[in-house]
Amino acid sequence: MKSFDRIFAAVAALLILIFLGANTALSAAEKSGQEKKYMVEVNRLCIELENGNTPDISGCEFVKGYEADNDSEDFFFSDYQYVIRNINGKLYRFDYVQKADDTTAIRIVLNSVIAFLSLVVLSVMFFVRNQIIKPFTKLENVTGELSKGNLTIPLEESHSRFFGRFVWGINMLRETLEKQKQRELELQKEKQTMLLSVSHDIKTPLSAIKLYAQALSKRLYKDEQKQKSIADSINDKTDEIESFVSALSKTAKEDFLQLEVNNDDFYLSQVIDNISDYYSDKLSLNRTELHIDSFDNCLICGDPDRSVEVLQNIMENAIKYGDGKYIGISFSDEEDCRLVTVANSGCTLKGSELVHIFDSFHRGSNSHNKSGSGLGLYICRILMMKMNGDIYAEIKDGEMRVTAVFKKT
C-alpha cells in the first residue's frame, strides 16, 4: 500500500511537471516567434539600405522607424526597443515593438487537455488503490495465517466485484479446513477410545490363555479330556482376540477421507472445458501433445466439481507416469453411461498390478523416485462410486488407459 502511494505521489508530481513544462515551452515559443517576426522586417529594411534605396516602413507591423548615426548623443536613446546594424560602414538604429500573439485559446486548450488527462490518470489510480490494492492488502496475510492453523477469524465480506468472490472463496476454504480439522480431532478421539476399549477387552481372554498355558506347561491336568477342554478354551479365546483384531482392521479400512459429494445434473462440457483450459497451457510448456476428441454434449449425473477432481487426478497420473509424448481424452457410450477415457503413452506399469492401483496407499512398481501418497486413484474410485459411476483401468498398445464412467440423465 505504501509503495503504491509513493507511485501515486510520483505520478502526480510528474503531471505537475508536464503542466509547467508545457506552459513554459509555449511561452518560449511565443517569444521566439515574436523575435523572428520583427527581425524579418529589420533584415528586409537592411537589404534595401545596402542597395542604396530608401526603405518604406509604412507596411511594417513591428518596425516603427529607423535612423542613421549622425553623431548625436540621442542616437542610442529611443522610446522603443531597437537594434543596431552596420550597413555599408554606417550605423543604423531600427526601432520596433513586440506584439504579443494571442495564444490564450491555445493555452486554454493545452491546459484543458493536460488537466483532463491528469484527472483521468489520477482517477484510475485512485480507483485501483481503493478497489484493488487496498482490499488486497487485507488478504496478504491470509495464507500465512491459514498455514499456521488460525482458522477461527473469518474475513470481512467484501462487495468489491474484483475480490468479492475471492474473499467468499477464502472464507469457504477456511470453513472447510476448520470442519476437516474438527472431523480429524473427532476421528482421532474415536480411534483412541476404540483402541483403549479393545485393548481392555483383549486383556481378559489373553489372561485366560496365559493361565491355561501355564497350567498345561506345569502338567496340572493329567486327564486327557480335561486337556482337550483347555485346548478348546484356548481356541475360543484366540477366536475372540481375532474378532477384536478384525474390528481394528475394518476400522482402519473405513473411508477416512470423508469425501462429500453433491450430486446434480450438469453438462459434460463443463468438466471437459475446465480440463482443456487448464492442461492445454500446462502440457504445451512440457511439450506434451494433448488431443481431446470431439464429443456429443450430454447431461450427466454427479458433482461437477468432484468430476473435475477425478479427471484432474487421472491427468496428473498420466503426466507423472507417462513418457511425456502424448495424452489423449476420448469418449464413448455404453447403455445409459458416458465413458471418458484418459490415455497416455509410455506405460511401464505391469499388467498384474492393475487390480491394486485403486487401493488406498498403493503405489505401483513404476513409482520409483516419484513423489506421491498412493491416494489419487483411490479417491477417484470413492468419488465415482458416490456419484453412482465407476472407474477402471487397462493397458493396451503400450498406453495406460483410465476410464471414468458417468451416468447420463
Image (cartoon, rainbow, N blue to C red):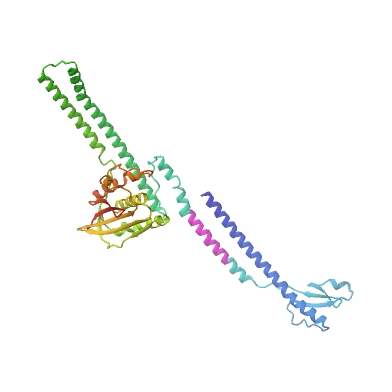
Confirm whether the magenta stretch covers residue 118.
yes
Q: Tell whether 386 sits left or right of 160.
A: left
Vertical placement of residue 335 versus 242, above or below:
below
Give the farthest residue toward the left. 225
Confirm whether the magenta stretch covers residue 205.
no
Q: Nearer the viewer, residue 230 or 11?
A: 230
Identify which residue is drawn at 19% across, 20% down. 213
Query: Residue 343's x, y, as percent?
Result: 31, 55
Q: Main secondary structure of the magenta part?
A: helix
Q: Tell whether 373 sits left or right of 406.
A: right
Query: Residue 366's x, y, as percent?
Result: 34, 46
Location of the C terminus (image quadrant): bottom left
Identify which residue is drawn at 70% across, 69% down. 31
Q: Tell whether 162 sits left or right of 254.
A: right
Examine the rendering and report whether any part of residue 358 can be seen: no
Numbered range of the magenta stretch: 112-129
Vertical placement of residue 111 versus 165, above or below:
below
Give the farthest residue toward the bottom. 53
Q: Nearer the viewer, residue 298 or 189?
A: 298
Q: Nearer the viewer, residue 122 or 277?
A: 277
Vertical placement of residue 47 versus 380, above or below:
below
Q: Tell whether 347 sits left or right of 80.
A: left
Answer with the quarter of the image where residue 212 lies: top left
Query: Residue 78's x, y, as percent?
Result: 81, 72
Examine the rendering and report whether any part of residue 110 can be seen: yes
